Amino acid sequence: MELLVLNANYESIAVLDTYESLIWTDRYNSYGDFEMFFAMDESSLKYLKEDNYLWLKDSEHTMIIEDIRIDADTEDGNHLVVTGRSLESILERRIIWGQRVFTGNLQNAIQTMLNECIISPSIADRKISNFRFVASTDPKITSLTIDNQYTGDDLYTVIKGLCEENDIGFKIVLTDDNWFEFSLYAGIDRSYDQTENPYVVFSPNFENIINSNYFSSKASYRNVTLVAGEGEGTARKTTVVGSGSGLNRREVFTDARDISSETEDGVTLSDTEYYAQLRSKGLKTLADHPITTAFEGEVEVTRLFKYGEDFFIGDIVQIANEYGNEGSAYISELIISRSEAGLSVYPTFKTISKKEG
């Protein structure tokens, strides 16, 4: 497993092969992270420095070294612990500058956010010169829309939230010519719910599931929200999103006072445009309160179905446990672990059921 340290110019300066353990996690719609554990060696500190990078041959993600800790122990010896996050965490370093309203195509909106905050911002100091956006042609991406307003939100939280709401992923890849390349992508359905792609199944019947956890809950489920925007008292603008009656009605309040009909550019939103913004925020609230069913499991990925050949992060696969609980689940993350016990590579599966009508 080839693991390299890159300097600030993305040049390889060391090959890492003396660590005692490594946990490397890639994720579908959030940043990944890593943790490395070494017996203390002062020579390692020459290249294991904050803001250097780690490149792993088995991953398309590059990690940023962020934290270095030295644990001194007279009995067990001194140890070096190095941790950090993947390039997607760079988005946390920027905010939506001022008030911005985004409507229409989702991918175009995210590209505009990146242009204004990173690629070609009006404030030159905000620019990251080797950052670029690559548009997706996948209809699962190009068909998505947005109708949101932001003021000062951090860019990572905005993009992560949009991707989670729409079940899509995002990534920043370090290219061979040293560009930070941002793109949106969608996993492929390989479950029993479709017939276009070969099935990928993890089940006791296939003897390829090591362990699994199944969870189902309606505790936090909500299906109706009262969204309240600008104004005071009886003059406050409100709208209702969702439906339900009797015992099946579960309500939640959405405070949308941050959504203004007057933009910083001097544009006044029409009532139709403003209430569309309120409805969008209400839908996000309901999306945060679903009926939850989840599979999480460790599976065998070297024989029947191989990661990187038969399925990838974000793909939807079929998963079952020994008690008859079965369903489709998406691959939310991939964990690569190496220690004295050997190398293990396994995905984490999660599925969130749709809300009741």
Image (spheres, rainbow, N blue to C red):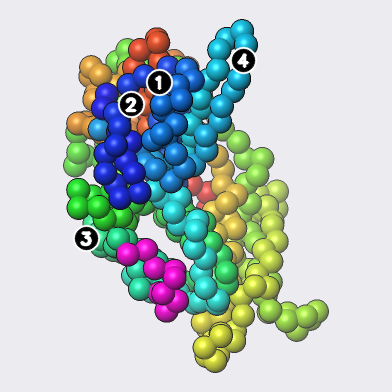
Q: Residues within 10 Å of mark 2 (few under 14, many from 20)?
A: some
Indicate which disc residue 16 carries: 2
Q: Earlier in the sequence, mark 2 or mark 4?
A: 2
- Residue that label 1 marks: 19
Residue extent of the magenta highlight = 121-129
Q: Earlier in the sequence, mark 1 or mark 3?
A: 1
What secondary structure prevails in the magenta region? Answer: loop
Looking at the image, which residue is at 69% across and 56% down? 251
- Residue that label 3 marks: 137
Check residue 18 for magenta coloring. no
Indicate which disc residue 73 carries: 4
What secondary structure is found at the residue carrying circle 2? loop
Looking at the image, which residue is at 45% across and 21% down? 41
Looking at the image, which residue is at 54% across and 71% down? 150
Q: Nearer the viewer, mark 3 or mark 4?
A: 4
Residue 199 % position (x, y): 24, 31
Query: What's the CA distance linking mark 1 and mark 2?
Result: 7 Å
98 or 39, which lies in front?
39
Q: Nearer the viewer, mark 3 or mark 2?
A: 2
Do tag 3 and tag 4 residues touch (Cβ < 8 Å)?
A: no
